[in-house]
Image (tube, rainbow, N blue to C red):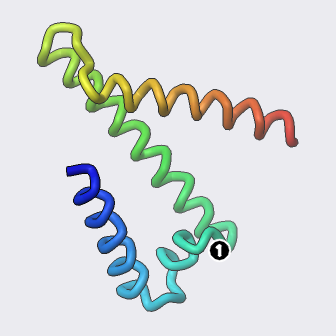
Amino acid sequence: MAAGVIVAYVVLAVIAFIWSGRRGDVAAIMRGGGDERQRSIDLRATAAAGIVTVAGAVVNIARTGGDPGPYGVVCMVFGISYGVALAVLRWRS
């Protein structure tokens, strides 16, 4: 199932890249480049995805009576990577 999800993600990413005309905002963000506005869009989208992930964990905890399930692992990885990135970026600036 994991391999199928990876393949689907890659296929959808290629479709989004081609659909954006290879020069649009989505393409610039996917290439890792882009101007300040495009990087801001990417930053806001990443923050929204993080909020949705945490909300999923909260909903799962409420539904199961205390067990976050797989959302707990995702939130743990998110929290650790956020903390490390925050420390590294703070140190670099």
- Residue located at (35% from left, 36% from top): 53
Element at label 1: loop
Q: Amino acid at mark 1?
A: Gly
- Residue located at (27% from left, 22% from top): 58
Question: Picture quarter containing residue 28?
Answer: bottom right
Q: Which residue position holds label 1?
A: 34
Closest to the observer, 49 or 2: 2
Apparent side of residue 71 relative to residue 27 in the rendered image (left or right): left
Which part of the image, by quadrant, shows the C terminus?
A: top right
User: Measured from the top left, where is residue 52 in percent x and y?
Assistant: 33, 39
Closest to the observer, 81 or 35: 81
Question: Picture quarter containing residue 81?
Answer: top right
Residue 26 position (above or below residue 21): above
Question: Picture quarter containing residue 29?
Answer: bottom right
Residue 57 position (above or below residue 52): above
Apparent side of residue 2 relative to residue 62 in the rendered image (left or right): right
- Report crowding for label 1: few under 14, some 14 to 19, many 20 or more residues within 10 A (C-alpha): some
Apparent side of residue 43 relative to residue 87 in the rendered image (left or right): left
User: Measured from the top left, where is residue 1 in percent x and y?
Assistant: 19, 51
Apparent side of residue 89 relative to residue 78 in the rendered image (left or right): right
